[in-house]
Amino acid sequence: MTEATGWSLVWKANAAFLRAGACVGLGWAFWRLSLEPGYALAILITAMFAIAFIKHTVVALAAVVRLLLRQTTWSRYRRQAGAPKADKMAGDADLRRQGRIR
């Protein structure tokens, strides 16, 4: 599996949260169905949706944690460096001194 970076990690987290929400909705629907007589198998389906919800929630939270850790790493790198400075432009006197122009 390839390493997700940048926006792909954001999309991965959002998709996992969406799948977790879908699992909750479908699980709730099957749980309501299991309350009716004759639909005892719906309890098993509800349990499977609950397990899928937990899995997708863990994947989404792991992606969010990775994004936060990446953000703190980048901010630590930015704090190490000083403010960006422009190079001094070489004037005519500097170029003459170095023998590049006459």
Image (cartoon, helix red, strand yellow):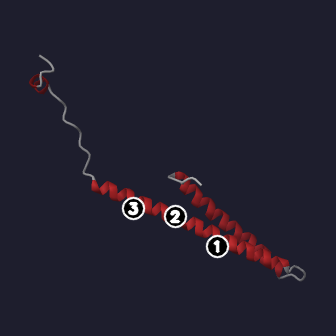
Q: Tell me the residue that label 2 is attached to.
A: 64
Where residue 1 sits in the image (x, y, percent)? 59, 55
User: Is 100 located above or below residue 43 in the figure?
Assistant: above
- Amino acid at circle 1: Ile
Q: Relative to 50, is 78 on the left or the right?
A: left
Sequence-wise, the earlier of marks 3 and 2 is: 2
- Quote the CA–CA distance across marks 1 and 2: 15 Å
Where residue 30 sits in the image (x, y, percent)? 79, 74
Q: Residues within 10 Å of mark 3 (few under 14, many from 20)?
A: few
- Toward the right, the furthest residue is 38
Q: Tell me the residue that label 1 is attached to.
A: 54
Q: Secondary structure at mark 3?
A: helix
- Amino acid at circle 3: Thr
Residue depicted at x 18% and y 35%: 88
- Quote the CA–CA distance across marks 3 and 2: 12 Å
Residue depicted at x 26% and y 45%: 84
Residue depicted at x 25% and y 49%: 83
User: Is 22 located above or below residue 35 in the figure?
Assistant: above
Where residue 97 sits in the image (x, y, percent)? 9, 25
User: Is 67 located above or below residue 49 in the figure?
Assistant: above
**Location of residue 49 (image quadrant):** bottom right
Q: Tell me the residue that label 3 is attached to.
A: 72
- Amino acid at circle 2: Val
Q: Secondary structure at mark 2?
A: helix
Q: Secondary structure at mark 1?
A: helix
Badge 3 vs badge 2, beta-carbon distance below 8 Å: no
Badge 1 vs badge 3, beta-carbon distance below 8 Å: no
Sequence-wise, the earlier of marks 1 and 3 is: 1
